[in-house]
Amino acid sequence: MTYAVEFQNLSRTFDKVRAVDNVDLQIGEGEFFSMLGPSGSGKTTCLRLIAGFEQPSAGSVRIFGQEAAGLPPYRRDVNTVFQDYALFPHMSVADNVAYGLMVAGVGKRERQERAQAMLELVKLGDYGQRRPAALSGGQRQRVALARALIKKPRVLLLDEPLGALDLKLREQMQIELKSLQRQLGITFIYVTHDQGEALSMSDRVAVFNLGRIEQVATPRELYTRPATAFVADFVGTSNVFDHAAAQTLCGQDRPFSIRPERIRIGQDGPREGEIGLSGELIDIQYLGAVSRFEVRAGNGKVLAVVSPNLDDHDVAFTVGAPVKLYWPQRAMHPLAPEENGHVAHA
Amino acid sequence: MSRMLERRGLSALTDALYRRPALWLFLLLAPPLLWFGLVYLGSLFALLAQSFFTFDDFTMNVSPVLTLDNYRALLDPANHDVILRTVAMAAAVTLAAAVLAFPLAYYMARYARGWRKGFFYVAVMLPMWASYIVKAYSWTVILAKGGLVYWFYRSFGLSGVVDWLLSLPGIGGDSLSTSTLGRFTVFTYIWLPFMILPIQAALERVPGNLIQAAADLGATPFMAFRTVILPLAFPGVVAGSIFTFSLTLGDYIIPQLFGPSGLFIGTMVYTMQGSIGNMPMAGAFTLVPVLIIAVYLSIAKRLGAFDAL
């Protein structure tokens, strides 16, 4: 089977830094695929390797089965939506959108018609004659999208495209991007450091750390069955118990992670199938729908607990008081014994 | 409360100015505006006003009788030639400077980092540290028969090429230093930094990701240059060309030291106000570069040179 994008033993080093370190990855046609990771984890470099702005130091990048290493960006059938949009400031919005057709030698009439159709697709039909500088952040974002899509790429690369937008707009754009991707049926490769964004839109997510992929999985799998401590901690919040903590605090002999919302904070005692530990409540954050508790356990480890604010449940607690935490055993997620997969490779 | 209000001396003055931003702005701008208005524009208008005065050829006296004769005289074939000769040279120098400056400015803005960037800055500006007169005279030595250039082309066996260039009508002459080619070379040398720096500054402001975006959308490097880099750097080219163009238009030293006989606007003004004392005619000649630059700028604006500003 041919993949939209396939990495084989792909590496990119800058001086001595391995920005991308021997990565294997297959991205299927029509997938909404996210590359998630903290800054400097190699996700953007991977995107640039697909776009052609970077060339691999070793390994191969295939786009629809064709080797792309060595091909300049203008010979690749992929288009990019840039982080800060990279709109041409000296051109009108319509000329920006039509740019890809203009350099391809498409006639003026057809260019204008297709640019207008594209602008209507992103709901900016009346903005063609404006300059990018006269648009809001969200509108520029849509222009960048229209400009990349007009070339009918088989793969669209998006480099943190919503990073500069405020929260409401970001949530709205997430929904629009997802429905656009379904409508067009092309492969979206989406780079983000925002795990919420990655979870809400993607078919699959690759979690990057230190130039390597920690896990590739569906959002649900990633959240419920994180493969490594890093994934458990980076995707959502997790209380990660390493080998020692698991043993001394709750008598478990394997490292595990537990999500804050699976922990019950109370005084009553364990229920059927629950284990628990006791600690001191050191902070309460009221967040509206939920409250977030920070509890320091016996050995100094700080645990996060999130519980819904039903019947002003949070008022019963005072900072500094001793509390007990309980969670069902099945909510514990075992982690691979090696704490950090990279130690062995460094 | 009372302690907060008790302020004396300088801090009381600071507080008073802080409460009156308009006064503060006035104090800030008054000195430069006075200088600019009185000394700078004032002297220019005084000169232009004189250009309407009458000069008596016989008594060599200037009388404040208003006339348009000086401007009529600009259209005399002899004066006409001076203007054309100067403008043609200024245009050629500007074009050559732009072609030479762009790649260097591009390298400085996009690729040079660290000590290389510093090196190029200093290298470009180093000639400006030396006196103009010294540089101009040093070129008389460089271009002289038996000088550096002479030795250089002789040792590479290029005498034939140079002789052929010097035999061409329009740019040739008896020797390098008395040819229009020599004059052009020195002009381009002297004004080149004034072209490099504005272009470099303009290119510095073109975000690198625009070039990547162009490539991403299918533009070859040449296409990206033509449709993105050049239009965005064009205000810098125009700014640089205003320097090289107007500096060449007004220069009166290099045309005297190099090239064939025949006056330039600068030498004409110099002669008129100096040895002849015909200030009105000098004033009329001064207006020519001002007008040419004004026309040039309006054409540049129409071409969209300032759209990217």
Image (cartoon, helix red, strand yellow):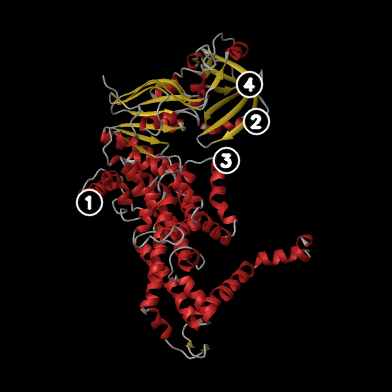
**Label 1's element?**
helix
- The answer to whether dots 1 and 2 both sit on one chain is yes
The residue identified by callout 3 is B115
Label 3 crowd (10 A; few <14 / some 14-19 / many >=20): few
**Label 3's element?**
helix
Quarter of the image where one finds residue B302: bottom left
Tell me the kind of residue under disc 1: Lys
User: Which residue is painted at 58% across and 34% down in the image?
Assistant: A285
**Label 4's element?**
loop
**Label 2's element?**
loop
Quarter of the image where one finds residue B92: bottom left
Between marks 1 and 2 in the image, the one whose residue lies nearer the viewer:
1
Tell me the kind of residue under disc 3: Trp
Is A170 rendered above or below residue B35?
Answer: above
Determine the chain carrying the residue at label 1. A
Q: Position of residue B298 (x, y in %)?
A: 38, 67
**Of B147 and B118, the residue lying toward us:** B147
Quarter of the image where one finds residue B295: bottom left
Between marks 1 and 4 in the image, the one whose residue lies nearer the viewer:
1
Quadrant of image for the C terminus of chain A: top right
The residue identified by callout 2 is A318
Determine the chain carrying the residue at label 2. A
The residue identified by callout 4 is A301
